[in-house]
Image (cartoon, grey):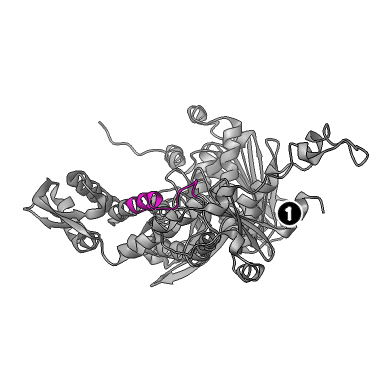
């Protein structure tokens, strides 16, 4: 076949296939240009999910007539020097505007403050008109209409207007999170108006994710070598059913990177079920020479020179923040209680029995809402509790043995003094400023699990295989496993190379019991190949420890004595991550006096 030179129009359309995937891609590129231009305000207007109209206005530095002419030509940019690794702006490829212009009707109006008037240029299906004089006070206005009109086949791949509008909103929010000092607004015939005023980082995150996030967020600020990690991450008890509320930024650039997602999943794995995800906004600042943002034309994927360093920083920083939070739990439990109570229903349902002070026939002893007598079993709690696998002990005695002086002393503690046990599972404690309800099984499960983890840090006991199991693997997988042999041995897995294409397994972690060594080795090899680490075995061991903790904890339905309940509360206060069980559920809920007074309308 004969080799031909493609026309400039076809080249731009091919580039548009990568850069302009959907209307949200156009929004992303135009907002990036506005931010690079030094804008303090960015306004976006859309119609029909961006298919009919996209308009982005900014008050940035604008462009001269000469710059505007070059801006719509391929590979023309003001943001890049000869060093492709020294990228300090969001855009640098010089492909966005010509690509957009090749598949739409594009109009750009811009003015520099030192110019006597603005200039306008139009690009229709790749054909350029202008520039010509125009009216504009400052900055740049870019209008994109009839997207993909010149390539109608692409329109068939777009989703509904609502779906495209939602995708645009997602991109808009990511850019707003990345640059909190800039005012962002978006509106149009296909949406309600959304505006974010200039703010601090946490305030902007609250604007985007909701105020409840800030009430349940932990600040992250850590550095290692040439990498700094900052931002905010939610308490494990504040979680969602998907990872859509996890935002990552590298040198201010919003990215979607599976290595960062994997690191966060690893950090939360100790606290959440696999189907739950934390909420966070993390910012990675790194020397541009140590990260490659030129992996894909969309610039949402990045590659780190040392991915292990970045992963370790994220996992370590998040786990340290969770540990420092101690027994702190999410406020969502309190909010749930407040919503569950419906003031007035009690009075309405009881109106047939009690018609007011004038009802002389009312007998409280016949009321369905009369107080129940204290159960005899409460004062006869069995001593079996002290024989179970617990990490605390307490002297015998019931709540009736505890005098008011002791209760007053216990109330000074963060989790207060135990006052009662409800339904043989929930401990009610009184604090100086309210009350706390504790799930005794969930709380003790976390206590036992943390104790098991401390034991694991001293070395995992291993079990010797009578006959070493030989696992055949590709040579490159064998080499990777051998490099991690020392780390694996600390986790109770002893391996050695058995020829060029096999691994001999001599010992396995005792806590795993009978294990398929071949499957375990193959899974580890796959993980090391993909992530460069062997955390899978550690995660599996921690899962086993969590299961052991669940079965070795105080069971639901156990009657506890007063001192036993207080001992559990004191142990929670000194146990890391005691605010949630191993499955991410809260171990306690707190109601302040103010909350209680609201329930009674005081």
Is 166 within the magenta? no
Helix or strand or loop: what does disc 1 sit on?
A: helix
* Residue 125 to residue 212: above or below: above
Between 5 and 432, the one lying in front of the other is 432
Tell whether 347 sits left or right of 209: right
Residue drawn at x 48%, y 54% is 76
Is residue 129 something that shows in the picture? no
Percent position of residue 349, x then y:
78, 34
Q: Quadrant of residue 274?
A: top left
* Residue 127 to residue 278: above or below: above
Q: Which quadrant, please, contains the C terminus?
A: bottom right
Give the residues drawn in magenta, as a range.
543-558
Q: Which quadrant, please, contains the N terminus?
A: top left
Residue that lies at the very extreme toward the right in this rendered image: 358
Residue drawn at x 44%, y 38% is 17
Percent position of residue 487, x then y:
24, 62
Q: Counting other residues with Cα less than 10 Å from the Cα at mark 1, is it few (<14), some (14-19), or many (20 or more)?
A: some
Is residue 389 something that shows in the picture? yes
Percent position of residue 505, x then y:
13, 52
Percent position of residue 395, x then y:
48, 65
Between 132 and 328, the one lying in front of the other is 328
Tell whether 485 sits left or right of 391: left
Q: How many marks?
A: 1
Residue drawn at x 22%, y 54% is 510
Residue bearing the label numbered 1: 596
């Amino acid at each position: 076949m004969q080799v031909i030179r493609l026309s400039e129009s076809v080249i731009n359309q091919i580039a548009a296939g990568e850069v302009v995937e959907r209307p949200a891609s156009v929004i992303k590129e135009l907002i990036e240009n506005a931010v690079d231009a030094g804008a303090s305000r960015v306004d976006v207007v859309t119609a029909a999910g961006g298919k009919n109209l996209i308009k982005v206005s900014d008050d940035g530095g604008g462009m001269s007539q000469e710059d505007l002419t070059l801006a719509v030509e391929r590979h023309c940019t003001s943001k890049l020097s000869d060093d492709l690794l020294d990228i300090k702006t969001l855009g640098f490829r010089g492909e966005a505007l010509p690509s957009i212009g090749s598949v739409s009707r594009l109009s750009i109006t811009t003015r520099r403050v030192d110019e006597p008037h603005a200039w306008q240029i139009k690009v229709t299906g790749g054909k350029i008109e202008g520039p010509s004089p125009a009216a504009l006070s400052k900055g740049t206005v870019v209008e994109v209409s009839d997207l993909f009109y010149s390539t109608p086949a692409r329109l068939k791949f777009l989703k509904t207007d609502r779906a495209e509008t939602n995708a645009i909103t997602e991109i808009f929010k990511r850019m707003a999170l990345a640059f909190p000092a800039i005012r962002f607004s978006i509106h149009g015939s296909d949406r309600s108006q959304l505006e974010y005023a200039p703010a601090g980082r946490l305030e902007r995150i609250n604007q985007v994710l909701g105020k409840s996030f800030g009430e349940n967020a932990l600040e992250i600020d850590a550095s290692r070598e040439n990498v700094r990690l900052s931002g905010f991450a939610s308490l494990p008890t504040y979680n969602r059913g998907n990872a859509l509320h996890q935002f990552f930024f590298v040198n201010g650039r919003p990215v979607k990177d599976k290595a960062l997602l994997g690191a966060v999943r690893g950090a939360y794995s100790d606290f959440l079920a696999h189907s739950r995800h934390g909420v966070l906004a993390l910012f990675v600042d790194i020397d541009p020479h140590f990260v490659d943002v030129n992996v894909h034309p969309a610039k949402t994927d990045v590659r780190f020179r040392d991915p292990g360093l970045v992963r370790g920083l994220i996992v370590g920083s998040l786990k340290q923040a969770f540990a420092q939070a101690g027994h702190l739990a999410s406020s969502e439990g309190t909010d749930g209680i407040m919503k569950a109570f419906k003031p007035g229903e009690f009075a309405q349902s009881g109106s047939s029995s009690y018609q007011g002070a004038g009802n002389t026939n009312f007998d409280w002893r016949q009321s369905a809402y009369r107080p129940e007598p204290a159960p005899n079993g409460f004062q006869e709690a069995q001593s079996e509790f002290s024989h179970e696998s617990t990490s605390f002990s307490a002297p015998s005695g019931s709540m009736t043995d505890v005098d008011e002086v002791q209760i007053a002393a216990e109330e000074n503690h963060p989790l207060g003094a135990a006052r009662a046990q409800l339904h043989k599972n929930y401990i009610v404690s009184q604090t100086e400023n309210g009350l706390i309800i504790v799930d005794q099984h969930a709380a003790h499960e976390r206590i036992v699990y943390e104790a098991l983890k401390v034991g694991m840090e001293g070395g995992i006991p291993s079990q010797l295989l009578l006959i070493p199991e030989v696992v055949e693997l590709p040579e490159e997988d064998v080499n990777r496993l051998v490099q991690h042999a020392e780390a694996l041995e600390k986790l109770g897995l002893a391996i050695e190379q058995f020829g060029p294409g096999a691994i001999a397994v001599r010992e396995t972690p005792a806590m795993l019991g009978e294990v398929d060594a071949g499957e375990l080795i193959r899974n580890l090899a796959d993980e090391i190949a993909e992530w460069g680490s062997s955390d899978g075995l550690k995660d599996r061991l921690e899962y086993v420890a969590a299961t052991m903790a669940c079965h070795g904890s105080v069971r639901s339905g156990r009657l506890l004595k007063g001192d036993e309940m207080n001992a559990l509360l004191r142990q929670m206060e000194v146990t890391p991550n005691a605010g949630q069980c191993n499955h991410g559920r809260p171990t306690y809920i707190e109601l302040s006096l103010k909350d209680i007074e609201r329930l009674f309308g005081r």
